[in-house]
Image: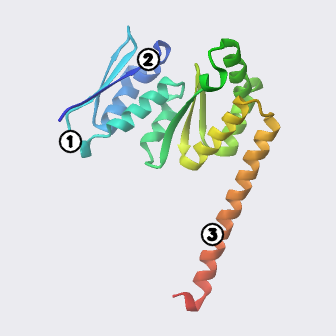
Amino acid sequence: MSFQHSIKIPRERIGALIGKRGKVKLQIEKRCGVEIAIDSETGDATVSGTKPADQMEAFRAIEVITAISRGFSPERACHLLEDEEIIFQQMDLHDYAGKSPSALERIKGRIIGEGGKARRMIEELTGSHVSVYGHTVAFIGRYPQVKLATDAIAMLAKGSMHKSVYTMLQGAKRREKLDKMRLWEDNYEKKDDPTSS
């Protein structure tokens, strides 16, 4: 059974997807057991494969290609190949800006922040990678990290103050630390409790 799927790549991202001497494209092909054909004129990338489904990670390949096309560096996009728990997600800023180009630019400006500060803060506080490209914001990370980053971006897109978004993220980070400590303490107490065995 053969598989085929096409993805539209912005022309300025084709070079990043191919990589120096085709290295990135080759890495995705080898790791996912697929073939990738790229039309530099149209920006169409076609992922295809003829191997059995269990020997092919076609959907992972599509995710990596999409991540690169949405502004992620190949290094960051390839994190998707390293761990099954790492996910890729994107949100469309048109949902918040409507059809207004000026509203879109304003929202993007709020998400990126001065000198990229807001985006960096969201990455630091959530542990996820964030890319603002065109009319999308894309995320790479574990599900809880991506969920938190998505919530933060949605708050900014709806007009929340940066300070209240950071406060929300710091609160979530504190709760996560407390949960981890409680879990560790519970396990530690069980080890010390002779009746628990």
Tag in front: 2 or 3: 3
Residue 126's place in the image compared with 8, above or below, is below
Q: Residues within 10 Å of mark 2 (few under 14, many from 20)?
A: many
Q: Is 128 above or below relative to 21?
A: below
Name the residue beneath numbered marker 1. Answer: 52
Task: Return the residue nearer the eye: 71 or 136.
Answer: 136
Q: In the rendered view, does 50 fall on the left or right side of 27?
A: left
What percent of the width, then of the height, locates residue 86? 49, 45
Q: Earlier in the sequence, mark 1 or mark 2?
A: 2
Q: Amino acid at mark 3?
A: Leu
**Helix, strand, or loop for circle 3?**
helix
**Label 3 neighbourhood size at 10 Å, few (<14), some (14-19), many (20+)?**
few
At a point 71% along the width and 52% down the height, the residue shown is 173
The residue that label 3 is drawn on is: 183
Badge 1 local density, few (<14 within 10 Å), some, or many (20+)? few
Distance (Cα) linking label 1 and label 2: 28 Å
Q: Does 147 sit above or below residue 29?
A: below
Could you tell me if the residues under marks 1 and 3 are in contact, i.e. CB atoms within 8 Å? no
Give residue 34's position: percent from left, percent from top: 28, 32
Which quadrant of the figure has residue 186? bottom right
At mark 1, the secondary structure is loop
Question: What residue is shown with label 2?
Answer: 14
Residue at image x 76%, y 29%?
Answer: 159
Horizontal side, residue 8 vs residue 111: left or right: left
Say whether residue 73 is left or right of residue 105.
left
The image quadrant that residue 187 belongs to is bottom right
- Above or below, 91 against 82 in this view is above
Residue kind at label 1, given as amino acid type: Pro
Separation (CA) of disc 2 from disc 3: 45 Å
Q: Quadrant of residue 103?
A: top right
